[in-house]
Image (spheres, coloured by chain):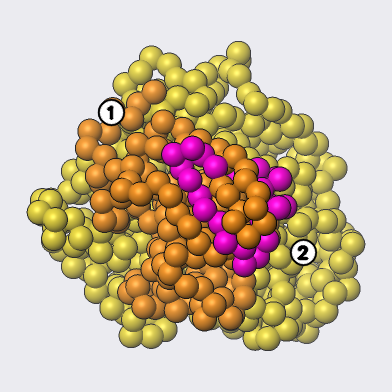
Amino acid sequence: MTITEKILARASGRSSVSPGDVVVARVDRVMMHDVGAPGVWEVFQELRSRGVDVSRLFNPAMVWMTEDHFVPPPDAKSAENLRIMERMADMYGISEYYRFGMGTYGVCHTLAYEEALVLPGQVYVGTDSHTVTSGALGAFATGMGHTDVAYILLHGKNWFRVPETILFRLRGELRDGVMAKDVILRVLGDIGADGANYMAMEFAGDGVASMPIEERMTITNMTVEAGAKNGIMAPDARVVEYYREKGKEVQVIASDPDAEYRDAHDYELPRIVPMVAKPHSPANAVELSEVEGTEIDEAYLGSCTGGKYHDMAAAARVLKRAGRRARARLVVVPSSTNVYRRMLREGLIDVFMDAGAVIGPPTCGACIGGHMGVLGPDEVAISSTNRNFPGRMGHRTSKVYLASPASVAASAVEGRIADPRRFLG
Amino acid sequence: MAEAGGASLRFRGRVHKLGDNVDTDQIIPAPYLKDLSPENLAAHVLEGADPSFPRRIRPGDIVLGGRNFGSGSSREHAPMALRYAGVRVVMALSFARIFYRNAVDGGHLIPVIVTEEAYRGIGDGDEVEVDLESSIVRDLTAGAEYPVERFPRLIARIVQAGGIFSVGDLSSLEA
C-alpha cells in the first residue's frame, strides 16, 4: 500500500484498502479558521432547530482554531465572525485557539507546522483547501467544507473515497536561486489544473530529503491546485527530529516498495529553473525567462505558500545582495507571529524596510483579496502566494504572476519580472 | 445543509453556459465570505466570472460548466451562493473534488457530469430538462438529448437523503 492507503486503512479499522474503496475513517485532528467556523456554527444552529443535540463535540481536544483570513478585522462583519469563534471555543471547550493580538497566531497551515499541531500518520481535516500542506509531515491532510467539518466535530469521523496516488520522484538538489515553488509550478504546468483531481500526490526521493521542511510544505501546499485530495511525503529523519525537539515521538509510515501507483513522474531538481505561473491559473506555468521584463505594480510576499520563515529569508537574501530600493511596491506579510518574531530577531525586517517594503501583520491578507495590499483595476503583481485566478487578489481586471519568494524579491528590485539568480551569482 | 431532498428527479430550466476552470473565487469572491446570509451570497454569485450574472440568474436556472468546475478553495459558500440564487442543478464536464463534495454533503446542489457532446451541443440560454431517473439531459430548445453520468452508489445515497446529516448511519455508505 501507499502511505495514503496505509493511513486510511488504519483510520477505518481495516487491514488494507484500495483506490476507489469508500471507507468511514476516524479523524484525528480538525482545524477551523474564521471563514470555516461561522459556517460550522450555522450548521449547528440548523441542526439544533431540527432537534439534534449539538451541545457537545465528539472530542474537543481534537480541534484547533486560528484567526487568519480576515484579521485584524478590516470591518465589523469580520469582527463578528471572530466573536462566533470565541463563543464556540467557550461553549465547547476548545483550548487550542490562536487569536490575533493575544500572543501566537497566524495562517493555519504555517501554525500547524510551527506549533506541531498535526502529527505524521494522522488523518487531518481543515476548513481550508490548503490543509494539504501538512502532508509534507506525513499526515493524510485534506480540506473540506463546513458541513463535512461540522459532521466530524459531532461524530469524529467521515466518509473518504480512497484516492489513487500519483508518484513524483525528485532527484538531486535545487541550484542556488531556485526554490520548491519552482518545482511545484513546474509540476502543475506538466499535469494541469485538474491533473490530480480526486487523487493523492506523493513526493519521494533524495530530492525531497535535500529540502528543508518548510520548502517541502510549499510543494504539498499547491497540490490542491492540481485538484489533489492530498499531497504527501513520508517523514524522514529530519521530520522525526523536528517532532522530537517539540517533545513528540512520532511513528514513521512509508509506502511499501510494491505499492501501486496510477502514474509516476521523475524530476531532476538540478535542471529546474525559476518558474512563473502566468494569469489566470497556477497551472499556466512557464520558465521565468519567458516573461522576464514584464512590468509590475506590486510584489507580494506572504500566505501559507510563500510567507514562511524560509521564504522570507530567501527573499531577504536577494534584496540584500541587490542592495537598493525596490522599484515596485513591496508588500510583506509574514504568515505567523513566529515568522515575524524571527524576522525581527535576525534583521530581516530591516532588510525589507531598507528596500522600501511595508510589513503587515500575519494574515491571509491580499492572497485572498481580503486586505493588506489588494490590487486595483489592471494592476499587475508578482506574488509568492498560491492562486492567480481572475480577481483572486483584488479587482477582476488585475493580473497575478505566481513565483518563488526569491523571484518576487528580484522582481521587486527591478520593477519588472526578474531572475533572482542575477543577484546571487 | 439541506431541506429533505430527493423528492424530484426531474429538473427543467434555462441554461447558463460557462467555460473551463470556473473557480470558487469566481463563484463567490473572498470578500463576500464574511457574511453567510442567503441575500449576500446570492447577490454576488458568479460575480467574479461576470458582474452581470447575479442580475441575470433566476430561480430554477441550470448552470453548465466545462472542465474542473468549482476548482480552488474549500469555501462551501460557493455551492451555497448558487443554491441561494435558486440553482438546484449544476452540470459540467468535470467537477473539482471539494466543490462536488460540498454540493452533495451540504445538500446544496445536484452536480451532474455530462459528456463532451452534450457540452458542445447545449447552448447558452437553451431550455433543458435533466432527468436523473433515466440519466438523460434533454435540450428542449435544440430538440436533442444526451446521456449524463449515473451517480456512484455513495453519491446517490447522499443526494437522495439531502445531505450527509440526513444519511443516518454512515457505515452503510462503505463499499
Against A59, is B150 above or below?
A: above
Crowd tier of the residue under label 1, counting other residues whose Cα lies within 10 Å: few below 14, some 14–19, many 20 or above: some
Badges 1 and 2: C-beta atoms under 8 Å apart?
A: no
Give the residue pinned by disc 2. Answer: A278
Indicate the chain coloured orange by its letter. B
B126 drawn magenta = yes
For the point 56% across and 56% down, which residue is it? B128
**Nearest-to-viewer mark from 1 and 2:** 1
For the point 64% across and 78% down, which residue is it? A396
Between A8 and A52, the one nearer to me in the picture: A52
Camera sees residue A385: no
Q: Quadrant of the C terminus of chain A?
A: bottom right
Location of residue A381 in the rendering, given as x and y in whole percent from the top left corner: 71, 75
Q: Is residue A193 left or right of residue A228?
A: right
Magenta span of residues: B113-136
Q: Is residue A116 left or right of residue A130?
A: left
**Callout 1, which amino acid?**
Ser
Q: Quadrant of residue A29?
A: top left
For the point 59% across and 30% down, which residue is it? A165
Numbered label attached to residue A213: none
Camera sees residue B138: yes
Look at the image and give the colour of chain A. yellow
Give the residue pinned by disc 1. Answer: B171
Q: Is residue B126 left or right of residue A266?
A: left
